[in-house]
Amino acid sequence: MVWCHQYRGYKSGSWMQADANSGHQERVADALLNDVDLRLYMHTAYGKGFMKGCRLSPDAYTQMALQLAYYRDAGKFNLTYEASMTRLFRDGRTETVRPCTIESCAWVKAMEDKAIPNTTRVELLKTACNQHQTGYRDAMCGKGIDRHLFCLYVVSKYLEVDSPFLNEVLSEPWRLSTSQTPHGQTSKMDLVKNPKCISAGGGFGPVADDGYGVSYIIAGEDTIFFHVSSKKSSPVTDSKRFARQIEKALSDMKNLFEAVGKK
């Protein structure tokens, strides 16, 4: 009986501890949830139809718009993450594309310099988009950077070899984390028969405390959905403000091509 009494007391204590842990975890989850600043922006001025008319990849075009929007919002460039599928390989999941390149920075700076003619801006944008496409193809074909670096990091830990280089590059925050969500997410919806049955999809939170998470769906010829997220606790980010910057960037890019086309 003593053993049973002690056993029941132990179990009772375990349940109490479990309840306490559950309550703590719930409070942590609530705090994280309430700190998310989410803004859904539906861009209907134009979509992939216009982008293809400019002979540019819609994904590259959208990524360049995000680069311009971020520079205007933060006043600087930052490490940018874009997810890429690696389905060409067995058990392949994702690799990282880095949209913030030397070419994209050159174009963004040209957009902010009134002395640069529109024809030069268009050429710089095309160069930036082509570089982005090259990076995307490389990532998709197993020629990416970040999975390789992470593998080296795992091996260094296994061999107990300290690498200042790996420690530095893997600790850099992704202040702009992006991903394109596929439009057709279920086979039960026939988009050919029902082209207007589009969904805004979903998004994700920011990776860095002072960064943005941007999920986007190029939903049709004239529709793009953006899910912009940040943390309310961050004094430097604002999802509503960044969504407006995306809208302005897309508008400026269209005006740029139209101005060059008229000439």
Image: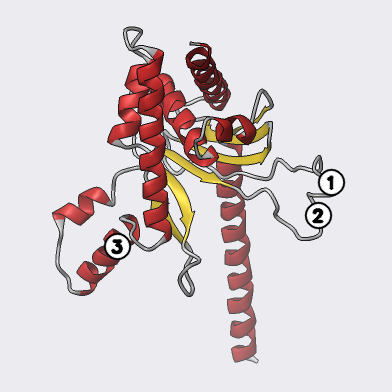
Pointer 3 local density, CA inside 10 Å: few below 14, some 14–19, many at least 20: few
Q: What residue would you read off at disc 1?
A: 194
**Which corner quadrant of the image does residue 118 belong to?**
top left
Residue 174 location (% of width, % of height):
38, 42
Mark 2: amino acid: Met
Which mark is first along the chain, 2 or 1?
Answer: 2
Residue 78 location (% of width, % of height):
34, 34
Which mark is first along the chain, 3 or 1?
Answer: 3
Q: Are marks 1 and 2 in contact (CB under 8 Å)?
A: yes
Pointer 1 local density, CA inside 10 Å: few below 14, some 14–19, many at least 20: few
Q: Can you tell which of label 2 and label 3 is closer to the viewer?
A: 2
Alpha carbon separation for disc pair 1 and 3: 42 Å
Q: Give the residue at x 54% y 38%.
A: 58
Relative horizontal placement of residue 40, taking residue 134 as reference (left or right):
right
Q: Give the residue at x 32% y 20%.
A: 109
Element type where label 3 sits in the image: helix
Q: Can you tell which of label 1 and label 3 is closer to the viewer?
A: 1
Q: Give the residue at x 39% y 42%.
A: 132
Mark 3: amino acid: His
Q: What residue would you read off at disc 2?
A: 189
Q: Quadrant of the N terminus?
A: bottom right
Pick the residue in front: 259 or 115. Answer: 259
Q: What residue would you read off at disc 3?
A: 148
Residue 139 location (% of width, % of height):
39, 56
Pick the residue in front: 229 or 112. Answer: 112
Image height check: is 13 above or below 105?
A: below
Do we see residue 80 in this rendering? no
Element type where label 2 sits in the image: loop
Residue 262 location (% of width, % of height):
53, 12
Q: Can you tell which of label 1 and label 2 is closer to the viewer?
A: 1
Alpha carbon separation for disc pair 1 and 2: 8 Å
